Amino acid sequence: MILVTGATGFVGRHLVRRLAGDAGLQVRVLLRPGSDTTRLPRGVPVHAMVGKITDVDSLLAAMDGVHTVFHLVGTETRGRHAQLEDVDIASIHAVVEAGLAARIGRLIYVSRVGADRASAFPVLRAKGEIEDVIRRSGLAYTIFRSSVLFGKGDRFSEHIAMLARAFPVYFVPGDGEMILQPLWVEDLVTCLAMSLEDLSLIDATLSLGGPELLSYRRVVLRVMHAARSRRPIIGLPLLVNQAGAWFLDGLFARWPFTEYWIEMLSTNQTSELGTIERVFGFRPATFDIGLLDRYMENRRYALELLRYIFTQRW
């Protein structure tokens, strides 16, 4: 039995479909009270339990008979409503305590490229602290540091498309030349699934990214092309972008790019090229128009933005 926390999130949905749907593995998901179960992949058999991710007793019940836990919980996408201390960091302490008591075989955690408890950025600092807790836990673990992810339902390419379709210009932090390494979410979940059988990855930390190094400006241009939207790209100082994101995140139920996203987009987000080929034996997909077209073609992103900002879902 495999336990997935954060199963209704972007990575969680794709991973559950891969493990329970494609591979036919037994998967249990822990859902917080009031979770939107419609966000779980349809037609995929999973064992769902309800409980708080910071409650050790709930986790112990969810870990009964479990050999591997994929911990995917994170609140950074909530912007000013993020609970990095109360949920992200508190949950890993509870997961470790329950995992030791339940004697699980391995804990697999998806972090971010650049995670460091000494980082100036709150999200990367929190993820660095979580990594340290895992390494000191005594549990067998694998940590995947992911670069920025894209795919249907993401909070990256789709959010760029929303803003590009809804407004006459598109603003980027600084000159927009910070370097990103977009990784297709399906390639990440392939690595996660393959890691179940790879004992060489026990107690390892891997940084994973796509096969291309692209400036944020070039990423935006490719998304605009796929979304059938051409807008001038204007650079603004980081503090102006952050202030705007903070204001809009408070004005509406939620906003596509939060101040945390702006912070992370202001620096290079890259890892060593070729890691996926070397470790997992396949070449990840490029951030190309053809792949983006699979989920962006004929979408009404301006209307989707309106639905997004007036609907609070987490």
Image (cartoon, grey):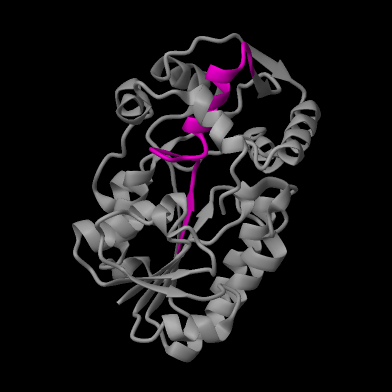
Q: Which residue lies furthest to the bottom in this view?
A: 101
Quarter of the image that includes the C terminus: bottom right
The region drawn magenta spans 143-170
Q: Is residue 215 left or right of residue 249?
A: left
Measured from the top left, where is residue 307 in percent x and y? 55, 35
**Left-right relation of 306 to 239:** left
The residue lying toward the viewer, choosing from 85 and 32, is 32
Can residue 140 be seen here? The reply is yes
Image location of residue 80, percent across then percent down: 73, 48
- Asked if residue 138 lies in the magenta stretch, the reply is no
Q: Which residue is drawn at 65% across and 41% down?
A: 254
Vertical position of residue 292 compared to residue 24: above or below: above
Position of residue 173 relative to residue 282, above or below, is: above
Q: Residue at x 34, y 80 (%)?
A: 67
Whether residue 163 appears in magenta in the rendering, the answer is: yes
Residue 249 in the image: state x and y as whole percent.
71, 39
- Depth check, front residue: 45 or 21: 45
Q: How many labels does the image show?
A: 0
Q: Residue at x 68, y 60 (%)?
A: 84
Residue at 67% from the left image edge and 59% from the top image edge: 126
Q: In this view, does 178 lie above or below 281?
A: above
Q: Which is nearer the eye, 131 or 93?
A: 93
Question: Does any portion of residue 194 appear in the rendered image?
Answer: no
Task: Give the answer, above or below, for where 122 lies relative to 198.
Answer: above
Q: In which quarter of the image is the N terminus?
A: bottom left
Q: In which quarter of the image is residue 82?
A: bottom right
Going by the image, does 71 lie left or right of 46?
right
302 vs 186, left or right, is right
Quadrant of residue 30 within the rendered picture: bottom left
Residue 107 position in % (x across, y down): 44, 72
